[in-house]
C-alpha cells in the first residue's frame, strides 16, 4: 500500500465523532459514510479496529494489556511520573483520554495498516522478557501518534473502544454503504454467521456488492456460529411447530457447546463465543484424532464433565474450564463430548443437507469411545414415545431433550434459532418459567450482612435490532456467600466510571456502580411483565421486566452477544 494507504488519523477522527453520537441510526450512517468509497483492505482493517479487535474473533488475538501496565507505558511514552499519570487517569476515568491529554503531537504519518501490523506484532510478542519489549514497542507506537490517535490506540490495546458500536451496527453499516437496500442486512447477517470474520466479509462486500455476501461457505479453521434451539411453553406446541411426521428427540446435555474442526492431526475446538478452547480439553483433541475416521471434518457437540461413565454437573465443568493447571485438572475433572451434528466432511459442506442425512454421516465417521460419544436419541412418529423418552432423560438426570425436525428442509442454520430444533426442559414441564441469560451492567450497594458487597445486580438483555443492552431485571436472591465473592472479584475488573454507551437504563434504576457488559449470568424468574423501571423492548414508557428473579449460575461459556434477546423475551411472555 505504501504511502497511499488509508491514514490512521482519518480513522481516529471517525472514532472521535462516533464517541459523541448516541443514536444507533446516526452511528450506522456515520460509519457507512466512512466505509463508502474506501478500498476493500481498508474496510477490513477498520472493521476490526472499530470493534477493538486486531483480527477476527476466532483467532486468539487478545492484546493482554491491563490498566496497571498501561499506566506505566504512558509514563514512559510521555516521560512523566507514574504517580502523575495515575492521578490523571483517576480524574479522567479512561486511559485513552489520559493519553490524549498527555500527548502534544498534532501530526503523524501513521497508516491504518501499519498501526494494525504493529499492534499484531506486539500481541505476538510473548514469553520471557517480553513485558519489556511489549512496553517498548507500545511506547514507540504512541510516540509516533497524534494525541487523538494515541487515545484510540490505547483503547484498542485495552480492547475497550467505548464507541457504542457493536457487530450489528457494523453489519448494518455494510448494508448501507455497499448495497442500496438496508433490507440486505439480514442476508449480510446470515453470511456473517457462516463467515464470522467481519473484516473479510466487509472487504468482500466492498469489492463485490451483495454477491460478496454469498461467496462464503464453511471452511476448516474458521468456525461458523452454531445453530440454536427454539423454546415452547407447552409440550403440545412442539407438534404444532415441528415440520415432518417423524420426530427425532435427542438427549439435551448441560455442558459447553463445542464446534470441532479436524484437519488430519490438527484439531481445533471452538466455543460458542468462537474462542479457541483446544488447550483446555486435550483429551477431546486426542480423542478426535483417534475416533473420527474422516480426514477432514467439522463436528458439533456438547462437552460435559464425565467420570466413571457418569455425566457430572455444569458447575464441575466450569471448574475445569481454565487456561492453567490443565494437566492437574484433566485428572480431577475428566470430560467427554457428545456429538450431535456434522457440518463438513472432506471438502464438502453439509450445511444444506437434511438432519437425517447429517446424522447418518456423523454415525458413519465416528467410532465411539469413553471420551467421544454420539448424542443418544429416539426417532418416532408417535409423540407418546417422544414424551416417554423425555421422562427417561429427566430420570437419568439430564436437562431434557432437543426435538429435531427430520423434514427435507431440516438444514443446519448457523447462528439461527428456528423451529427446526426445539428444546424441552424439565423446568418447563414442572410449570416453571424459562431461564434467562442476562449480562450484568450494574450493582447497588448492599446493607447489613451484605455491607461491602453488592446488594443486587442490575441485568440486561440484548436488543439486536438496536444493537444495545436494555435492562430487564434486578437480581438480589439466589447467591451463596461463595457466589458473592467470586462474582465480586470478577466484576471489579469490569467497573466503568460512566454508563456504558451500549446500555439503555432508566434514571430511576441507575446503579451505584456500572460495569462493562461482559459477565453473563443465568436467572430464573416467575413472570415477565411491563414495568416503567426497565428498558427492554420499551413501549409507551414501559419495558419488559422479569419479576422475582433468582440467580442460578454464572455462564462463563456465554458472551454478551450470546445472551437472551428482547425478541426471545417477547416470545416467552406470550
Ligand atoms: P439453551 O442453552 O438452553 O438455549 O439450550 C440450547 C443448547 O443446548 C445448545 O446451544 C447446546 O449447547 C445444548 N445442547 C445439549 N444437547 C444438545 C443436542 N443434543 N442438540 C443440540 N444442542 C444441544
Image (cartoon, rainbow, N blue to C red):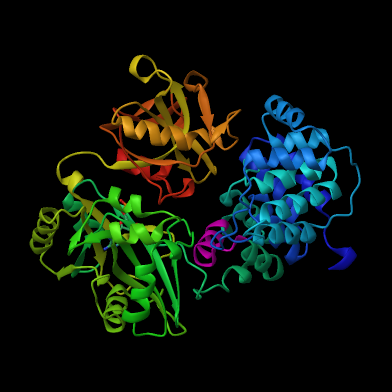
**Ligand 1's quadrant:** bottom left
Q: Image quarter for residue 68? A: top right
- In the picture, measured across the screen, residue 401 lies left or right of residue 67, that is left
Say above or below: 267 vs 168.
Answer: below
Is 226 covered by the magenta stretch? no
- In the picture, measured across the screen, residue 66 lies left or right of residue 416, that is right
Closer to the camera in the image, 345 or 497: 497
Observer able to see residue 118: yes
x and y, in percent, of residue 216 in the image: 55, 72
Q: Image quarter for residue 71? A: top right
Q: Give the quarter of the figure containing the C terminus.
A: top left
- In the picture, measured across the screen, residue 1 lies left or right of residue 481, that is right
Dominant SS of magenta comes to helix
Q: Which residues are magenta?
A: 185-198
* Residue at 27%, 42% in the rendered image: 434
- In the picture, measured across the screen, residue 144 lies left or right of residue 41, that is right
Observer able to see residue 162: no
Closer to the camera in the image, 568 or 478: 478
x and y, in percent, of residue 536 in the image: 44, 34
Q: How many marks?
A: 0
Closer to the camera in the image, 77 or 469: 77
Is 190 covered by the magenta stretch? yes
Amino acid at each position: 500500500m505504501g504511502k497511499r494507504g488509508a491514514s490512521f488519523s482519518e480513522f481516529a477522527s471517525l472514532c472521535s465523532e462516533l464517541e459523541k453520537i448516541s443514536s444507533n441510526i446516526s452511528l450506522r450512517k456515520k460509519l457507512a459514510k466512512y466505509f463508502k468509497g474506501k478500498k476493500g483492505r481498508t474496510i477490513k482493517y477498520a472493521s476490526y479496529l472499530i470493534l477493538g479487535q486486531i483480527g477476527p474473533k476466532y483467532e486468539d488475538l487478545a492484546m493482554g494489556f491491563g490498566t496497571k501496565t498501561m499506566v506505566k507505558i504512558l509514563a514512559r511514552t510521555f516521560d512523566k511520573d507514574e504517580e502523575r499519570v495515575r492521578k490523571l487517569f483517576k480524574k479522567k476515568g479512561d486511559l485513552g483520554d489520559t493519553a490524549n491529554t498527555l500527548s502534544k503531537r498534532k501530526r503523524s504519518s501513521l497508516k491504518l495498516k501499519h498501526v494494525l501490523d504493529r499492534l499484531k506484532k506486539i500481541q505476538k510478542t510473548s514469553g520471557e522478557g517480553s513485558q519489556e519489549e511489549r512496553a517498548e514497542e507500545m511506547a514507540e507506537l504512541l510516540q509516533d501518534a497524534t494525541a487523538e490517535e494515541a487515545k484510540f490506540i490505547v483503547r484498542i490495546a485495552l480492547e475497550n473502544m467505548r464507541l457504542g458500536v457493536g457487530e450489528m451496527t457494523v453489519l448494518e453499516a455494510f448494508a448501507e454503504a455497499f448495497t442500496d437496500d438496508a433490507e440486505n442486512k439480514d442476508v449480510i447477517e446470515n453470511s456473517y454467521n457462516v463467515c464470522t470474520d467481519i473484516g473479510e466479509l466487509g472487504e468482500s462486500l466492498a469489492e463485490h456488492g451483495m454477491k460478496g455476501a454469498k461467496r462464503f461457505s464453511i471452511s476448516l479453521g474458521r468456525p461458523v456460529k452454531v445453530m440454536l434451539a427454539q423454546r415452547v411453553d407447552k409440550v403440545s406446541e412442539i407438534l404444532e411447530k415441528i415440520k415432518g411426521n417423524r420426530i427425532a428427540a435427542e438427549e439435551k446435555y448441560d455442558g459447553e457447546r463445542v464446534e470441532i474442526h479436524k484437519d488430519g492431526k490438527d484439531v481445533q475446538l471452538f466455543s460458542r463465543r468462537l474462542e479457541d478452547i483446544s488447550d483446555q480439553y486435550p483429551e477431546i483433541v486426542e480423542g478426535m484424532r483417534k475416533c473420527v475416521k474422516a480426514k477432514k471434518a467439522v463436528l458439533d457437540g456438547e462437552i460435559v464433565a464425565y467420570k466413571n461413565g457418569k455425566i457430572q454437573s455444569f458447575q464441575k465443568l466450569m471448574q475445569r474450564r481454565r487456561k492453567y493447571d490443565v494437566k492437574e485438572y484433566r485428572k480431577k475433572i475428566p470430560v467427554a463430548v457428545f456429538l450431535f451434528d456434522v457440518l463438513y466432511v472432506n471438502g464438502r459442506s453439509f450445511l444444506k443437507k437434511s438432519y437425517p442425512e447429517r446424522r447418518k454421516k456423523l454415525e458413519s465417521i465416528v467410532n465411539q469411545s469413553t471420551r467421544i460419544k454420539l448424542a443418544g436419541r429416539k426417532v418416532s412418529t408417535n409423540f407418546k414415545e417422544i414424551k416417554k423418552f423425555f421422562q427417561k432423560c429427566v430420570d437419568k438426570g439430564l436437562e431434557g431433550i432437543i426435538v429435531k425436525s427430520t423434514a427435507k428442509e431440516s438444514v443446519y442454520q448457523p447462528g439461527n434459532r428456528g423451529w427446526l430444533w426445539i428444546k424441552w426442559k424439565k423446568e418447563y414441564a414442572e410449570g416453571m418459567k424459562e431461564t434467562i441469560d442476562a449480562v450484568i451492567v450494574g450493582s447497588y450497594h448492599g446493607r447489613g450482612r451484605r455491607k461491602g458487597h453488592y446488594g443486587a445486580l442490575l441485568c440486561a438483555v440484548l436488543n439486536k435490532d438496536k444493537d444495545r443492552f436494555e435492562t430487564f431485571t434486578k437480581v438480589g436472591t439466589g447467591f451463596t456467600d461463595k457466589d458473592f465473592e467470586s462474582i465480586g472479584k470478577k466484576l471489579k475488573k469490569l467497573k466503568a466510571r460512566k454508563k456504558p454507551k451500549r446500555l439503555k437504563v432508566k434514571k430511576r434504576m441507575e446503579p451505584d456502580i456500572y460495569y462493562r457488559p461482559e459477565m453473563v449470568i443465568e436467572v430464573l424468574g416467575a413472570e415477565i411483565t411491563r414495568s416503567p423501571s426497565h428498558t427492554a423492548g420499551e413501549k409507551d414508557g414501559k419495558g419488559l421486566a422479569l419479576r422475582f428473579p433468582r440467580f442460578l449460575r454464572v455462564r462463563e461459556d456465554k458472551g454478551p452477544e450470546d445472551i437472551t434477546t428482547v425478541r426471545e423475551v417477547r416470545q416467552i411472555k406470550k
